[in-house]
Image (tube, rainbow, N blue to C red):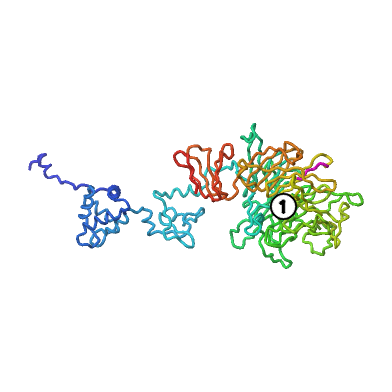
Amino acid sequence: TSAPTRSTARSVAIRKPPAKPSSALVDKRIAVLETSLRQAVIDHTRPLERYSTVLLRLCRAFDHEGKGTIGPDAFQGILSCFNISADEDECKALFRNYGLDLKGRLPYDVFARTLFTSRNRLLAWQDIQKQVPFSSQPTLERKKGEEVFRGKIQQGNKRCVTGVYTPTGWDSADLKRSREKPWAHLELQHVYGYAGKTEWQRGGDANKMDPKSSVVSPNLFYTSRREVVYYTATVGIVLNWKPGDSPGGVPAVNEQRFFFSHDDDILCLALDESRNYCATGQTAPVKRKKGMSVKPTVSVWDVHSMQELAQLEHAEMKTEDGRTESGAMGGIQAVCFSENGKLIVSVCKNIKSTVHVWNWRRRELIFRLHSKQGVPPQVFGVRWCPVEVRSDDGSKQRLFDFASFGVKHISFWKEELKSESGQQREFKNGKNWVAEPGEFQPAKEARAKQAEIQDVLCVEFLPNGDVVSGMASGDMYIWRSSTHSSGSQLKRKDKPRLGIGMQVVRCVTYEELGSKRTLRAHRHNLQVLKLRPVGIDRTNDVLLSGGGDGEIKMWHLDPQGFPTLKGAFEIRPKDHRRAIKPNIKALDTFPSSNEMVIGTDQCDVWRVYLKSVPAADRSVETEQTIMVKGHMKDLNGLDAHPTKEWLFATACESDRVYIWNALTKQELGHARLHNKKATAAAFRHNDGKRLAVG
């Protein structure tokens, strides 16, 4: 047989069927088909109509039997209405993705609902996470589950029905990076404001301060380098500020250093006599675990290096049988250094106002005793007495060691070398202090009849051993010892046990020029007293006082040691004609200078320079500059300018909106909302020429 020709071979060759497309290619075609159909339906949907409604209406038109299902032929007809073509295999593949019945038909209600639902939400209908979805330190088994999770997350005891879903395009590989600390970090550059918040009691006397919600302890001082130390929230701040060339202009230096050791709000601040070491006491930390004890702390730190030198934890006191006394230690309400700087006195914000005395360098508690019982805070402040007076035998001695004061009381504490009180000592070193209360209504004296019992807001010590106190009504009381030589003419019904015998001898008043009316020292809330030494012999010392009337008054001491008004000046804001006078919260002077720093209840810090001595009409020429500007109440709104990155706006509950310069750290302007609280502020997004306030 002859071999077949080439043409014959071609005629008998077997033709192979075309290769089926791969599954990846089919999935790609299905994704394109879904996207095209989804976009076509969106384009044909009228406003205020759901996308699924249009698709359902069209499916019902092709469902002639009304069974809620359609076949591949009907589905191709639906696609042709939108000018989309697809073969039968692609339709069947699409049916398999969205579910088929036993006859291979597509339930179009399910298809229309799921076509416009995200993939993660579809998965969430089956996979629901009812705990913290992604933990920072997961176990190996949980880590594997988190890497494949793309479902619904419901958290909390009362879980939300809707929940939240993993975002579109979620990649589980991002979890590894999310569990690591970011390479970038924030660094605090400047703090606006000062802790001078003041709340007033509702009803009754509108000028009476609410000590529970107000700052009552002094918190603003000069350091040895002429810097200013104060606090805001949990941060201790040291401000290096120097005025510029023009008064009220941009300062030449405006820098801050920060102390970050506290983990909750600071309540009090004190500086030692050298002005190099600072002590700050904070409120008690929040309990994070059941049964966790609350131990508020006092931190001692260097104002130059900002390094913490000691941290003093205040533990709860225990009864004789070893049980913990009821009542949590709510925080440290007051703190002060001793004259030599070796001891620290702190008072807790608990129902018994526990007084602690520490040797802070050794972190050793040497004395502890309850003082004033009541709803805290009962004690507003504590001050160590630096004055020694000459006794009858010619020797110098201190009448008492320190004084604590607050709600309708003042107590003078003196160390007892021998326990005459009969109280059991808790510490082995033999240190024991006993308090003697001051007497508000002593022997009959004409000028002391007005000395009613009221809250004591501040104290200062005079060179002759007297104590001057500022009262809630604005009065100024002079306290003198009945056992001291200068006060031997005073009478007492009983002999003081500690030999202190402090009692009110005068309520300081002055005559108004022109009217001859007798007025009290300040209208209300005399919260600041500061003795400004003048000269070596201390004969021209000036007593500075600041109250709720926004005035600083200068008092000279007469030969008997009683203050006499010589001058006064007001703190004047820029819009002082319309603005409310600020209450004076803190005041300090730099030694041997005419410069002072003042804190107000508007959370501002002022620098005041005395240009002249008081004139005959009691006027004083001053130069006043705001060093730190803040908000009077809670800050709720903040927004940055869209085009000027150095400009931002803030809104607070004190009915004011401020515009700030982030470069100079100064206020550029503000607007008042007429007793309306601002909760939000936003610049117009395109040019920032308008500011919306809510």
Position of the N terminus by quadrant: top left
Q: Which residue lies furthest to the top in this view?
A: 245
- Residue situated in front as seen by the camera: 604 or 390: 604
Is residue 299 at all visible to an observer of this figure? no
- Residue situated in front as seen by the camera: 416 or 498: 498
Quick check: 204 left or right of 543?
A: left
Q: Residue furthest front?
A: 515
Q: Which residue lies furthest to the bottom in this view?
A: 321
Disc 1 marks which residue?
474
Q: Position of residue 327 (x, y in %)?
A: 67, 63
Q: In this view, does 155 lie above or below 518?
A: below
Marks counted in the figure total 1
Q: Is residue 541 magenta?
A: yes
Quick check: 276 left or right of 52?
A: right
Q: Where is residue 671 in the image (x, y as percent from the top left)?
A: 55, 44
Is residue 606 at all visible to an observer of this figure? yes
Q: Which residue is drawn at 66% across and 61% down?
A: 328
- Residue situated in front as seen by the camera: 330 or 73: 330
- Look at the image and give the residue range highlighted in magenta: 539-543
Q: Where is residue 262 in the image (x, y as percent from the top left)?
A: 64, 50
Q: Residue furthest left?
A: 1
Q: Is residue 28 magenta?
A: no
Q: In this view, does 198 lie above or below 228?
A: below
Q: Residue at x 62, y 34 (%)?
A: 249
Residue 614 in which image quadrant = top right
Q: Position of residue 364 (x, y in %)?
A: 74, 54
Q: Main secondary structure of the magenta part?
A: loop
Looking at numbered disc 1 in the image, what kind of residue is underneath it? Gly
Q: Is mark 1 on a helix, strand or loop?
A: loop
Q: How crowded is mark 1: few (under 14 residues within 10 Å), some or many (20 or more)?
A: many
